[in-house]
Amino acid sequence: MIREISLALIKLHILYHATRQAVYGLALIQELESHGYSLSPGTLYPLLHKLEKAGWLAAEKRVVNGKARKYYRATETGQAALLEAQARMRELLAEMDEGRIIPEEGE
């Protein structure tokens, strides 16, 4: 179950960064590592392909320093999905904050 939650959060990270600028696999792996996620290319690229197939990402091939890279940008559909997810997350976090599922010290 925790893996499913982590994968959902990773997808949101991908969409967020792909909304801000075009991103490629290795850069995403490094960015996700800075947030505590350890992803192999064998995990990341299928996620990118699923998001692309769903119409949330658009891919563009570029040659950088003689190497072919596939860059991804969020589509309008992907941006709309991210905004909806953001609203739902805000609602959930506010609810969790009110209910405090983990008691604070002294409670």
Image: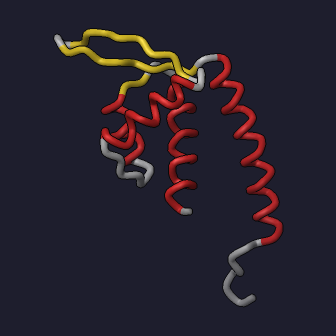
Q: Does residue 56 sit above or below 29 in this rendering? A: above
Q: Identify the residue at the far bottom of this view.
A: 106
In this view of the protein, which residue sits in the foreground, 6 or 106? 6
Query: Residue at 50% across / 34% down in the picture?
Result: 14
What is the total number of numbered labels drawn onto the structure image? 0
Whether residue 41 sits left or right of residue 48 in the image: it is left
Query: Residue at 75% across / 35% down in the picture?
Result: 84
Residue 70 seen in the figure: yes
Q: Does residue 101 sit above or below 81 in this rendering? A: below
Residue 19 seen in the figure: no
Q: Residue 55 sits in which quadrant?
A: top right
Which quarter shows the C terminus?
Answer: bottom right
Whether residue 45 sits left or right of residue 78 in the image: it is left
Which quarter shows the N terminus?
Answer: bottom right
Q: What is the x, y in percent for residue 82?
A: 66, 33
Q: What is the x, y in percent for residue 19?
A: 57, 24
Q: What is the x, y in percent for residue 8?
A: 57, 46
Q: Residue 30 sits in which quadrant?
A: top left
Q: What is the x, y in percent for residue 13?
A: 53, 39
Query: Residue at 71% across / 25% down in the picture?
Result: 80
Whether residue 50 sits left or right of residue 75 in the image: it is left
In this view of the protein, which residue sits in the foreground, 88 or 1? 1
In this view of the protein, which residue sits in the foreground, 2 or 67? 2
Q: How is the image coloured?
A: secondary structure
